[in-house]
Image: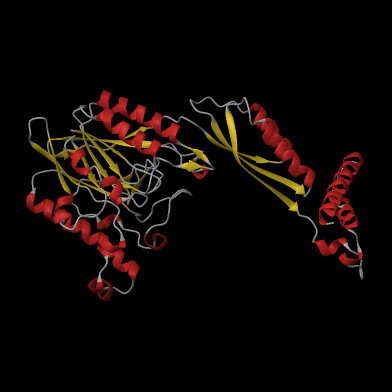
Amino acid sequence: MKIIHTADWHIGKVLHKHPLADEINLFFEWLFKLIESEKVDLLLVSGDIFDLANPSAKDRQLYYGFLRKLVGKNLKIIITGGNHDSIGFLEAPKELLSELNINIVGGAINNIEEELIEVKDKNGKLELIVAAVPFLRDKDLRNSETDELYKNRTEAIREGIKTHYHTLGQICADKYPDIPAIAMGHLFAVGSEISDSERDIHIGNAAAIESSAFPKSFQYIALGHIHRPQIIGGSPYIRYSGSPIALSFSEKEDQKKIILLEINGLKLTAPKVIDVPKSRELKKFSGNLMEISAKLEKYKPDYPLVSFVELEIKEDSFSSKMLMDVEDLKANFSEGTAFKILKSKTTFKSGTKDTADLFKTGESIEDLSPKDVFEKRLDLENLEDELKESMKAAFQELLEAVQQNEQ
């Protein structure tokens, strides 16, 4: 039996007002071909299917369109809810999808044994048990008894998660002693390396779970929530697949992955990590304006999608003209390039003076006309005389217009 572990699709994610639907669509196309070529039997998706609890019509179409393509491929699919997902939305078509060999567990189930899903081969022989554990919310883990038993809310949550997995593990050991078992999860584990795109869960991740919290009855733990692929507790059998696309500029250097597992008889082979092809590059350029301009001229990305660029401009002294030049630079590279500038930040080693520093001792702003104040401020700028005169004329025109409107 071949199994793929993926998570954190975040369908509907927007990066600086730019939707990432194209990346997800290309990932789905690649994953579909991989499932076909590898003859995968089981697809596990460990939470955060959507980025928003109420996804748009286009995002729903992308999700259901991918599932529809997989129907009839002799593939079983198990999807669990994450902290971004709406339990009600994910589970609304649950009964219908189950008829298509797609199991949805959007939230914790009162009868915990129902989170255990049997996976059978083509001949109906039981080959695997999957503990489809979704994101566990406070209401799933805490009650008056636990709050009295533990010192604080954080400890109650941590112990609640541990108890949840150990209960499922014990059921597997008792009811399916000779069948391999895998657990899914959407949580924060101790030692995880996070990026800027994760939302804190469980009190700022204070309730992080130790790898020892997962019982030995599970041969593999398929985790979601952390967007960087990584193993936990030094074990390749407890791992985050990570998100399949970069969800923030902090992930620009990450190689996205999915995990391929194989079960032969009762034994799980070592997980195989497969790189997800990068469809668009996230790139950051730092330096002064002249340096960055030269770097942009040379930058020729070669990816299926237009690359996204972040600029970090560092100058010695403040100049309003410099800010104008930055905007001109962004405009110059806004069309006809293989990249798009999404974000820029300009900093100066020495900033502008406080307004009070513009005046001599004993001089007050009330003693000056608006034109005098503007010209004093203009004198602080390192501008050519011609530009200064042009700005003075523009200011005078605006001042006269304002004064006329006040009359």
- Is 359 left, or right, of 292 in this rendering? right
Find residue 7 and report its horizontal and vertical position in percent: 33, 42
Residue in view at x 26 percent, y 58 percent: 213
Q: Is residue 161 visible?
A: yes
- Is 280 left, or right, of 185 in this rendering? right
Q: Quadrant of the N terminus?
A: top left
Q: Quadrant of the C terminus?
A: bottom right
Find residue 306 and report its horizontal and vertical position in percent: 53, 29
Looking at the image, residue 156 lies above or below residue 36: below
Which is more toward the observer, 237 or 305? Answer: 305
Residue in view at x 61 percent, y 26 percent: 337
Find residue 48 and report its horizontal and vertical position in percent: 35, 46
- Is 266 left, or right, of 97 in this rendering? left
Residue in view at x 12 percent, y 54 percent: 171
Which is more toward the observer, 64 or 251? Answer: 64
Which is more toward the observer, 196 or 212? Answer: 196
Tell me the quarter of the picture where residue 245 sits. top left
Q: Is residue 217 visible?
A: no
Single out the residue that lies furthest toward the bottom: 148
